[in-house]
Image (cartoon, coloured by chain):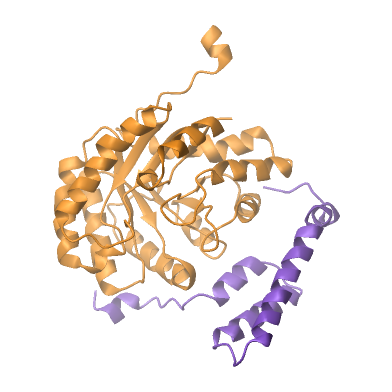
Amino acid sequence: MSNARTSQEIFEREFLELRSKLLELAASFDRMQRGPGEPDQRARLVALGLDILRDDNGDKAARIQVLFSREYSPDWRVEFGI
Amino acid sequence: MYYIDPHIHMVSRTTDDYETLARMGCVALSEPAFWAGFDRSSADGFRDYFRQLTEVEPARAAQFGIQHYTWLCINAKEAENVELSREVIAMIPEFINCPNVLGIGEIGLNKNTPNEATVFMDHLDLAARLGQLILIHTPHLEDKLQGTRMILDMLQSDSRLQPERILVDHVEEHTIKHVLDGGFWAGMTLYPVTKCTPQRAADMIEIYGTERLCVNSAGDWGPSKPTAVPDFMIELRRRGHSESVIRQVVYDNPLTFFRQSANFQFREPLDLDTALA
């Protein structure tokens, strides 16, 4: 189903929301930085997710979903003995 | 506009919520059997739950003109206990002919374990033997992609099952294509944090179209919004989509899927013109 809205129209409508979400992310990183110690290895996934946001490719939502997903093995039934 | 919520757990909601749903245009809903927030200690706990789903909730919904349908199973979280699961599955035929039962659901996987897969296949066998529709729960978060692929493997390896009689729920951006390409119905669940927002569901409608796609709130005892389907309708409207597109997703599609069950005796609400004719 095609979406008749232009990129500019979508940006116009979502600009304040985008700005707000960026600020939320920034504030989360600030809070972590102020706290003592380091976050666990999931922080690496978050960093990779930010890279996806900044690259030139599409399907960003699906690719971030896959980034945070466990791997599927087509041989799972053999591994389970089912 | 009238709408149908194909997946909402009203046992967890107040009577006020039924009234709110009715005010928002909800004319029918379906309530899959699910986890109560704690593991039940015996099959008798499920017997009482099935009575609640087949006797109590339809009467509560009817007070507000909402037609209540349901699905029966032992959910994936409790399916880790295979012995209990098989006792519950053996009890389901006692309730399967209750007038508001649409089929077996919401069955599926939770942590994608061998026991969950075993009980899932037991449920599939029951549905195939009884000729029932199937409603499927897919796991959350990092388990979703793997679990959805496993579920599709099991469905596609049972030649008795027809994809058009199965709805795979809680699809998101990384699982929706797998489900639709298999010929199954897909449900998008509008649920805070762990599932899909109305905006992302509207994006998926724009990418994949309206065929075999439904949306639901999955409102339950956790943080959830039983009126999430109207939020989705408003989002599509704000984007300029036609009323017929919105109606297909929130009304026509659930009707088409549910009408495959002989128990679905839906009474169309009369609009003013029809009532005056």
Residue shown at 35% from the left, 78% from the top: A75
Q: Is residue B19 left or right of residue A52?
A: left
Across and down, in percent, residue B52 comes to 26, 41
User: Residue A74 appears in which quarter of the rendering?
Assistant: bottom left
Across and down, in percent, residue B156 comes to 35, 60
Across and down, in percent, residue B21 comes to 50, 36
User: Residue A68 appears in which quarter of the rendering?
Assistant: bottom right
Residue shown at 55% from the left, 88% from the top: A41
Query: Which residue appears farthest toward the front when viewing the image?
Result: A35
Is residue B266 at least partly visible in the picture? yes
Tint of chain A: purple
Residue shown at 31% from the left, 52% from the top: B161
Q: Is residue B199 above or below residue B251?
A: below
The chain drawn in orange is B
Across and down, in percent, residue B71 comes to 31, 45
Q: Is residue B102 above or below residue B225?
A: above
Is residue B260 at least partly visible in the picture? no
Q: Is residue B65 left or right of residue A32?
A: left
